Image (cartoon, helix red, strand yellow):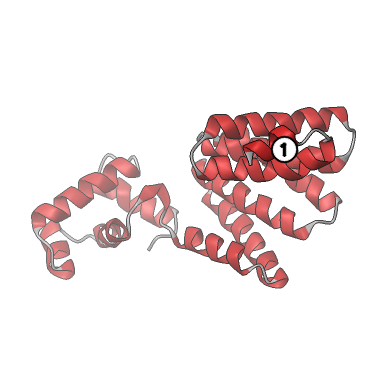
Amino acid sequence: MRRALQEAADPVTRLRLLPAAVEIAVATGDLDAADDAAQALRTIAEQHEAELPRALASQAEGRVRLAREDASGALPLLRAAWAAWQHLDAPYESARVRALIAQACESLGDTETAALEREGAAWTFRELGAAPDLAALEPAAQRPPAGLTPRELEVLRLVAAGKSNRDIAEALVISEKTVARHVSNILGKVDAPSRTAAAAYARDHGLL
């Protein structure tokens, strides 16, 4: 990919290659390379007053910021990209951006908007028959928030039900020591000072 970019001099070819370069770099964790490719897209967008380059540039920059855990910086860029793709009548790209917007909203704690964006993206992927995109999206929709593991989610639900560590250990057939470790991890992940606060978090986030 890098060699192809180096050999590509005309903007049209670079415009075709750079978005893929951003995605590959983000996927491999080379965020500096992703940043370079996104900035190259922005340069092309500034030189050519057309909506397509602007959409690609905003999407690329938003993706990179999201990968750098800057969800608040990513969100306006991704929303700008979505608006541009909508104007260009590009439903597939619009859905891909909505999936990224969902990630950004989730990172910012806006789980309600995240769910709406993800559902909208999933609907479009189904309509278009974009099975790989749908498969990549649906596991994320099923993932518990705050980085909770499936086992921690089970424990959290039992905590919210008022169960003691002994009760939870018996229900899940694990030791009380393991339960205590899970509870400690849960309190840290959801930033809750007590079991009562953790139970409130579970209710507020629709985990019960």
Q: Give how far across and how far down residue 146 sits, in percent.
A: 40, 47
Q: Give how far across and how far down residue 198 sits, in percent.
A: 31, 49
Q: Which residue appears at 86% of the width and 28% of the height?
A: 47
Q: Secondary structure at mark 1?
A: helix
Tell me if 106 is positioned left or right of 171 in this view: right
Relative to the observer, which residue lies in front, 160 or 173?
A: 173
Q: Which residue appears at 66% of the width and 61% of the height?
A: 120
Q: Give how far across and how far down residue 178 sits, in percent.
A: 14, 54
Q: Which residue appears at 28% of the width and 56% of the height?
A: 152
Tell me if 182 is positioned left or right of 114 in this view: left
Q: Which residue appears at 81% of the width and 33% of the height?
A: 45
Residue 145 visible somewhere in the drawing: yes
Q: Give how far across and how far down residue 89 sits, in percent.
A: 84, 56
Residue 79 visible somewhere in the drawing: no
Tell me if 170 is positioned left or right of 106 in this view: left
- For residue 90, what is the image quadrant? bottom right
